[in-house]
Amino acid sequence: MTQSSTQSPTPVFDGDLFTDDVLADPYATYAMLRELGPVVWLAAHDTFVVTRYREARTVLASPDLFCSGRGVALNDACNQQTAGRSLIATDGDLHSRLRKILAHNITPRAIRHLETQIQTQADALISDLVARRSFDAVEDLAKSLPLSIVPDLVGWPADGRDNLLQWAGATFNFLGPLNDRALDAVPDVVAMMAFAAEMAAGGRLMPGSVGAGVVDAAANGELPPDRVAALIVGYLAPSLDTTISAMGSALWLAATHPEQWELLRRQPELIPNAFNEVVRLESPIRIFSRVATNPTSLGGASLAEGARIAVLYGSANRDPLQFPDPDSFTIDRANAGEHLGFGHGVHSCAGQGLARMETHALLSAMATSVARIEIAGPALRATNNLINGWERLPVRVVPGN
């Protein structure tokens, strides 16, 4: 697909959105894209991109017109492997059936029984870290709780957890353009899918888990056996990486905006809204794509049938037409909950209920015991095609009641 196949010209951006420099600090580039227009042709990536909130929400709310079933990646190799198999790359009745298979184990109501356990674990974790005073907010905090909760929920066996984060990160690299990161990710993606398939076939998923439920659904004829591994991995990987991203960003923003942390401590009832503001400002997923199923127009651009169009979540969530003073971190922002950081519509993040529960628990534990959070050394952004987060974030905390 090239720009010449559209019916009217659109603004063109020739730069690469996936260089190390842009991934480390993308927001000036996103602002430039928004200035170009709500829909921009990315020449380097052979796709249109939606840069503004209204148009992004329209795409996400219109699955019949902008489908996921032809793949949501920015490269054909990944789309050929995932289209029609992964939850995020299906549409219509198939998507509904796959989501229903997961739903009875992952809805907010279904995981409510985990709330006390998660809060207890969060309290113990924060108590230990406050006693240490200094720690890495990614390695010691953001990774700790999801890694102790999500694999058990999915039913992933203990002997297969050492590579989980590496494998999960690879799945998101493979969903980007076919650059070096995507190519380097292929062996890990293959390994994760093979391990998931072996577990499912060998009955190694823990009874009563999300994964075991998927295997049971296949045995009952509710989905083809060759979709079992993709459905399990498609829930597991985002439930780890997006939650770790959001937790790391929450600590970064709390440390760099001490007045907002003080407000949160005074008004802990703002924690749910503060989490929404974190996800808005530092969207965990950078971008997913859709395909136009019919000729249509969007944001002044004419799109041919088959045109691939990507939603740039991190840009849409900082659109000043939707969020006043969009680059500021404001935990009592009135419309923070309107963010698109977990998607929107039928493809909204299936694991967001658990992500909210885990992050709310950590923020609640910290708000009662930490007076101040400070950056204690050089921080390093993670470099991943799709996940926006931190690789290293050394912090120091000052206890307080």
Image (cartoon, helix red, strand yellow):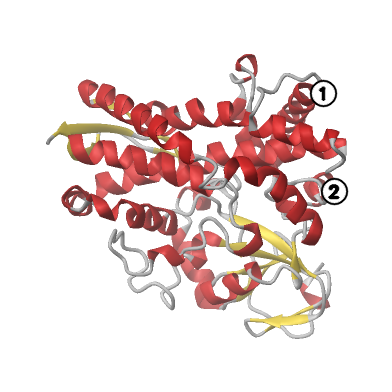
Dot 1: few (<14), some (14–19), or many (≥20) neighbours within 10 Å?
A: some
Residue at position x 75%, y 55% in the image = 95
Residue with the most extreme left position? 401
- Image spot of residue 253 (x, y percent): 31, 49
Q: Is residue 303 left or right of residue 172?
A: right
- Residue 379, position in %: x, y? 36, 37
Mark sitting on residue 201 = 1
Image location of residue 94, percent across then percent down: 80, 54
For the N terminus, give its image quadrant.
Answer: bottom right
**Res 44 quadrant in image:** bottom right
> Mark 2, mark 1: which one is toward the viewer?
1
Q: Secondary structure at mark 1?
A: helix
Q: Quadrant of the C terminus?
A: top left
Q: Quote the CA–CA distance across marks 2 and 1.
A: 23 Å
Q: Find residue 187 and report its image quarter.
A: top right
**Horizontal side, residue 131 vs residue 253: left or right:** left
Other-residue count near label 2 (Cα within 10 Å), few / some / many at <14 / 14–19 / ≥20: few
> Closer to the N terminus: mark 2 or mark 1?
2
Q: Nearer the viewer, residue 114 or 255?
A: 114
The amino acid at mark 2 is Gln
Q: How many marks?
A: 2
Q: Measuring 53% from the left and 55% from the top, which residue is drawn there?
A: 342
Secondary structure, mark 2, is helix
Amino acid type at image mark 1: Ala
Task: Work out which residue is located at the far top of the displayed protein and give it.
Answer: 159
Of residues 305 and 215, the one drawn nearer to the viewer in this rendering? 215
The answer to whether 190 is drawn above or below residue 160 in the figure is below
Name which quarter of the figure residue 233 lies in: top right
The residue pinned by badge 2 equals 80
Which residue is rendered at x = 68% and y = 41% of the image?
Answer: 234
Which numbered disc covers residue 34? none
